[in-house]
Amino acid sequence: MDITSPPLLPGNYAPILVIIIMPLLGAIVNGIFGKRLGRSAVTLMALAAIGVSFIACVFTVWLLIASSHGPAPVTRLKWDGWEWLRLSGINDIGDIPITFGFFVDALNGVMSLIVTGVGFLIHLYSTKYMQDDPSYHRFFSYMNLFIFSMLVLILGNGLPVLFVGWEGVGLCSYLLIGFWFKESANAAAGTKAFIVNRIGDFGLLVAMGLLVRYVGALDFTGIQTGAAQLVTPVEIWSGTSALAYVAARPFEILGITGAAHWLLSPGYATAATLVGLALFLGCAGKSAQIPLYVWLPDAMAGPTPVSALIHAATMVTAGIYLVCRMAPVFVLSPFAMFIVAIVGAVTAVFAATIAFAQRDIKKVLAYSTVSQLGYMFLGVGVGAFTAGFFHVVTHAFFKACLFLGAGSVIHAMHARIHDTNAAQDMSNMGGLRRYLPITFITFAASWAAIVGVPFTSGFFSKDEILFQSFTLSVASPVASGTLETATGPISIFVSPPWVSSVLLSLGTLGAVMTAFYMTRLIVGIFFGRFRGWAIAAKSAHSSEPEVHSSGPAPHESPWAMTLPLVILGTLALGAGVFNAAVFHYTPLEHFLASSFGKFENIKPRPNSEQLEHVLLLPGIFAFVLGTAWASWVYLVAKGQPARRFVERNPALYQLVYEKWRIDELYRETIVGTLELIADICVWFDKWIVDGILSRVTSFVIALLGSSVRLFQTGRVQTYAAFIVLGLGGISWFMMTPHAEAAIATDHETGKYKLSAEPGIGYGYRWDSNGDGQFETPSFGDQLSIDVELARTERRTVTLQVRDIFGREATRKFKLERPAEEQLGPRNTRTNNNPDAAAQPKDPSARGQNELNAPSHAIQPGQPQ
Amino acid sequence: MTSLGKALIDFVPYIMAFTVGALIPSRKSRFERFTLGVIGVLLLAFVRGLWPGVQQSSAPAQEWPHLLNVVVFLPMVAAVVLLLLPRQSAGFLKAFTLGVLLVDFAVSLLLLRAPMDVGWHFQYIAPWLPRFGIRYHVAVDGISFWMVLLTTFTTPIAAIVAFGSIKERIKDLCFALLLLHTGMLGAFVALDLFLFYVFWELMLIPMIILIGVWGGVERIKAAYKFFLFTMAGSVLMLAAILYLVITHKQIAGYYTFDYLALRHVNLSHTAAWLCFGAFALAFAVKVPMFPLHTWLPDAHVQAPTSGSIILAAVLLKLGSYGYLRYCMGMFGGPAWAVGANLAGLVIVAGILYGALVAWRQDDIKKLVAYSSVAHMGFVMLGFAAATQASVQGALLQMVNHGISTGALFLLVGVIYDRRHTRSVQEFGGLASVMPIYAAIFVVVTLSSIGVPGTNGFVGEFMVLLGTFASQSLGSFATIQATLATVGVILAALYMLSMVQRMFFGPLSNNANRSLPDLTVRETVVLAPAIILIFVIGLFPSIFLDRSSQSVTAVIEQYKDARRAYQDMPDDSNRAVLLPRRGGPLEQGYPEDPSAIPELPTVASAVEAKPNSAGGQ
């Protein structure tokens, strides 16, 4: 087949639409018509949709592989789509058209293979697992919608389209966690997942805003091209602002001048760091990293296939995908990379500690997922993008297999117990390998992969991460290591050399713990004797423990559930062949190279080649130690050491069992504060805002009304009395002389005219030259007087009036002529012709500049 | 054969759209099937007809100058006719009113035929009170015509809802609805400030009647509150209008109330600030902006469902539309100067405060009302940021808010009709008894919190990203935009908590055990809104393209006005008339009557039209 023929490459590659639209079609058909179609049709629709999508993915990736060689290699296939909306760059310069288009390259090609491939297997599995659910069609509609959203996420051509999928998968996750919505806890878990994810989405939105501001592009190609503009200092803390002053004040008072000085000097970060951290907040939300991991364990409230697909294999790895895709931005900020790596490493260890104490097998797997995601971030955070991404691939296989295996176990247990919590409790299991042989074998294969048994897939991927975390480092993106700012050069953060040792130690520690709790899990489920013969399950209806001492023995699941297990288990064992870096056989890395390119500032430490085989040891050591230790504790000693430990440290155990009470901590601090603020707002709204605007105003009006009403008594005598009082007042006013005058001012000519207010029987005399002597000693009838002043001259003009009773009143008027025409403080122009002031500065840019209407200057409020 | 075949192929998508629409309902209601099918066809025609780049008819369409007159006054004429109809035949009155509103909607769709390039379209000018320079001047541009369509789209829906739940005083109801319709439309298309003020006040009366007659228990108080708040603002606006007119008379020598002329009056700083304040107050009450929002929860809670729909979907938009058109159009200087502060206010006291207060409400209608404060905060933020993307986003957000909040009130009305309570506590687990209702409620909720793919996202996204790149907010743009983005989290918080408490969990309240799901009438009314949620979400360009040129022009004018304001000396107390730039935006400028020998008559105004219609 001639793959370079125009219809397929690279203008508009239509099969990409098949990949995306099929799951959407499945979702719509099952969602709207599913109830009427019946179960078999729903099954057919759902499976066919994902199956066709998978085949299209295989074809596309094959096409990419086949055309990646030769003189004109094709590394991406795209479909341009339609213009979605249009943004503008800073200061309205530059259009940023956002197209709703998709593309495939090596990175998202592999990812879409996993999504559709593993997705298909899990769909197949679900057809039996969800067989008896009354909302069968709804389940598959959501699942198909999830696959669709996930494909939009990974195939989108820019951050906005990615964001559509990003929130879409969050929405599907919300819907599927709360799938059995009749239980309040499930619905609450769904809401929690959505809101915590939204906090991450907030980060992604901010990152997009910053990219628009500093790069002016949101599509991946544009970001890659313009990423260099992100190495620019941004003032994030102004040392001169009022806030800085307020913050520094306490330190000054306390005499800690160092802190005060630090607060009063400006702080800078590169735009790349800001974008990187904002993006990572989004990743932490979706991929359940500290501090936003709390939703993922609760998400296990959803059906088990959902946990396998969304909360283990695909959606939660979207964060890694985003970091890989935005690698050109991340590598520009060693600080952001450092944060990614350290958060990943700490999460890997922290989540593993919680997994130690959980009895619910899904919870153990959930924390294991959080921990493994931490490994992936550790990998991408040190710049080992391929290694991190390869762990996404292998993790998808073994964790999906583990979850589906757990589902198979739960399926078998549920047949006996009919209580979701008890059916997932490890303390009711044991010895199941006799009843569920296929499940056991596949589970064991995945266990081998996750604990890192040599030559399984997990061994290769985890080992590569540990190796790279020690050897790789991110150097400054600019050669000099400093950036010029307004207040002098600032140096770019580069992680100190000891960090790599810390990362390696944390990684190894996490690996030991992983081996321990996974061995505990597999021993607890499959070894020993079956503890489920007599299960004390608290029934929902009575508080008395209900004892099931009889019932069917657990049985193996049907083929539709075991076949996916076998396939995934095989892949978990054998997928290492795609990227066996230890043996220098890395087809995946070669394939992905076209997506990642080469980053100049990510450098391995010298003689890292020699370390390669030495650094295999920590991984193998972790596996041996963890497994042996856990086997001794749980297999040989039958869990005695663990029980003794719990008895000796009950508080510690309780704390770990309750997940370090992080949920409670968040609830008390963040949610509690928010609730308090909200309550204050409600109170403020009711009593202050509405109180002043409605109650106080209405009270004032009512008060005025009532006081005026007092006078309206309706009694003629009162009215007559008021009339007399009023007449008296007026008479008194009339009989008192008032010396008042209006001044007509004209600073321009210096002529001023004072006009006295006339009164009955008044006589006037003036002192216009300010010498204290009235010009006419007697009172005349001169009503007005003209005064002329020189520049800057001041004068006091006196007016005296006398009424017919001989009483006199005097008033002085101070006149002053300013030196020059007063100008506005801001205005530096000497020409103050207001008509000219309104003229545009550049008439040529104004188009037709015709003045049709005559323009006069007036003084507002004084009609001419 | 070929042409016939072509025609057939052209028809196939429509037939498919009809089939899909007709297949969706699972009930045995032929009416429902048929209507949904028709809605499907109309939708397809709508999207295809508006698709960017689709050639309109080959010759530039002749704009019929009376189109706006018909759209605006048809309901009013119908209202007069309605007075002559017998009160007893309620069914006929309902059908008549609904028919008129639907015809009005259909006629208003003709607006879409204009390319909506820069300038005024469907302009019609006639002298009204020539002595005072008052003219009947109506026109639309790329901004107001979406508002007109939103209005003509919303009122029929509100009418159907009202006819479903209100059983008494039908004639009064019909009259009020028709009159309200004219008032709202008129306020959007008027370009003469006197005419604008008349329409602005005209719509107030029917709205008070709607709340005060068919409202809840405390309806009189709510109606008073609504009236007094609005009145206080608009009286000040009237004073500012008169001041502007007199100033124009003094500098240009003749009276005019025309927007085109008055926006050339460059007032002195003090006067500009006072006039801006008066206008801004009137619009801030309507939007509503903190702290003038307290009438809104009361009005929404007490208003009947149809009143709430119109209030949320259209009346609030008049506030933001007025701010864009008049405050930013005529007082660019003060508007620019308050821009950053306004943005801060709407973020902290609108988006965040509104969301937090909404979160703690138990009454669903109150919750939605406070969420309106938050949503309208995004709109005002878009205007304050004043970039191409943010203003376009804000405009789209106005339409979006109309659709999704209108639909939310409709949905609340559905449950209120069944249970006569709006307290969230009374519900729980409704998803098991009313699955279709729950599904639609969730879809509208998603639109309201701005999940990508729905309309709410596009508006918010454009506003936020426009704000990030805003120049008018200065160095605060990034911080303010980041803070506003927090609102996105809070929106999810309050809406999803409400949805969770209402629809999920066990069915705890026995009173909810046998609630019927959506009726055919309710489904049919909701369907267009649901479809538009996705159409705007996926193809916003069909909306944005038609407004982009007008928005560019508005921003240009805004910047010019700011420049003129800055050139005006601080202590000058003289107003000046800005030079005219000509071009399509000043087509219809009121000339000095003394300079033109004879007054323009109706006929000459109409004749002047054709050469200017597709002028550029």
Image (spheres, rainbow, N blue to C red):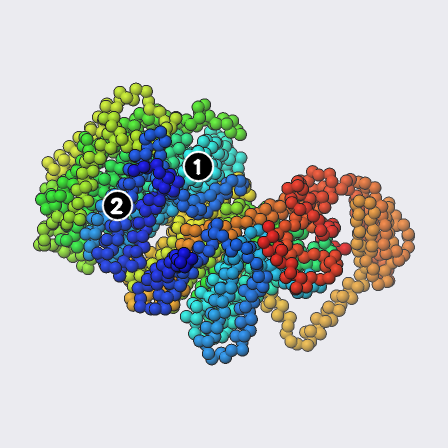
Residue at figure coordinates x 17%, y 38% from the top left: A445
Q: Based on the displayed image, in which of its 4 quarters is residue A270 positioned?
A: top left
Q: Is residue A484 visible?
A: yes
Residue B274 got which mark? none
Q: Which residue is mark 2?
A: A119
Quadrant where the image shows the C terminus of chain A: bottom right
Q: Tell me residue A465's x, y (percent).
A: 28, 30
Front one among B442 and A350 = B442
Front one among B448 and A522 = B448
Residue at figure coordinates x 29%, y 46% from the top left: A53
Residue B570 vs B145, above or below: the answer is above
Residue at far front of view: B1
Residues marked 1 and 2, same chain: yes
Kind of residue at badge 2: Gly
Q: Which residue is mark 1?
A: A222
Question: What is the total number of numbered labels drawn onto the structure image?
Answer: 2
**Disc 1 and disc 2: Cα gap in Å?**
31 Å
Front one among A709 and B282 = B282
